Image: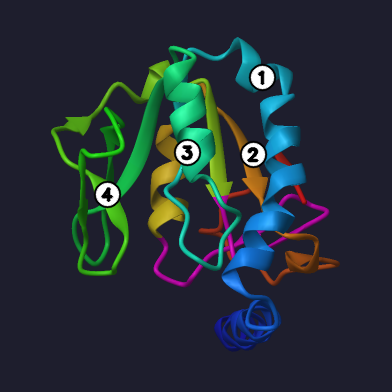
Amino acid sequence: MIQLDKKSLRKEVRARKKQFSTEELIKESRPLIQRVLNHPRLQNAKTVLLYNSLPDEVYTHDLIKQLHNEGKTVLLPVVVSDTEMELRLYRNPNSFETSSYGILEPIGEAFTDFSSIEFALIPGMAFDKERNRLGRGKGYYDRFLPLLTNAYKVGICFPFQFLPNIPTEETDIKVDECIY
């Protein structure tokens, strides 16, 4: 029953996203990214986990470059199988390849020092006031987030993705805070 609720919720959020052009979503991303940049946990962090945004997500491409240029170690997720993702170091804008999902992913070896990650910015289809996250349905982040024992996990979404309540299961992992 919960799976069905999640599936219909994802469909609803996808429909909401389609009401905006990519350019509009990039514009709507700016104040959200500014709040991320002003976050004390990010400002004090040396190693951060971000994500290379898809066209329907809060735009992070400039944030990745900016934090890298500020001297932070920036990590990005890479999908390596149907059930697993790993982290790789962002080196420069040219060190990417396009994955089978159409996502630009950094080239290089897996980063495994998870305890050094101090701040993690987490995308989602939706979040709620209890800090629950609804992902795209593959469970990548739910399996990965428990490994980030020292990271302050911040979910980020557009205001229309912040919902009153999200159905949850035991395997769903909460974030520490949500910016919307």
In the rendered image, which residue does mark 1 sit on? 41
Could you say whether the residue bearing mark 1 is in a helix, strand or loop?
helix
Q: Which residue is mark 3?
A: 50
Dot 4 corresponds to which residue? 105
x, y percentage for residue 87? 29, 38
Q: Earlier in the sequence, mark 2 or mark 4?
A: 4
In-image side of 78 versus 131 (left or right): left
Q: Is residue 23 above or below residue 74?
A: below
Mark 2 residue type: Val
Which of 151/74 is in front? 74
- The tag earlier along the polypeptide, 4 or 3, is 3
Q: Residue at x 61, y 55 (%)?
A: 58
Give the residue at mark 2. 154
**Distance between the alpha carbons at the discs numbered 1 and 2:** 10 Å
**Image quadrant occupied by the N terminus:** bottom right
Q: CA distance from mark 1 to mark 4?
A: 25 Å
Label 4 sits on a secondary structure element that is strand
Whichever of labels 1 and 2 marks the residue nearer the N terminus, that label is: 1
Magenta stretch: helix, strand or loop mostly: loop
Give the Cα distance between marks 2 and 3: 10 Å
User: Going by the image, does 129 lie left or right of 81?
Assistant: right
Asked whether the residues under the numbered discs 3 and 1 touch, taking CB atoms below 8 Å apart as contact, a structural biologist would say no
Of the residues shown, which amino acid type is indicated by label 1?
Arg
Using the image as rendered, state which of residue 56 and residue 174 is in the foreground: 56
Badge 4: residue crowd in 10 Å (few <14, some 14–19, many ≥20): many
User: Disc 2 to disc 4, how far (Cα)?
Assistant: 21 Å
- Labels in figure, total: 4
Residue at image position (39%, 69%) is 138
Q: In this rendering, does residue 170 appear at all?
A: yes
Give how far across and how far down residue 108 sits, in percent: 14, 35
Mark 2 or mark 3, which is nearer to you?
A: 3
Residue placed most toward the observer, 2 or 73:
73
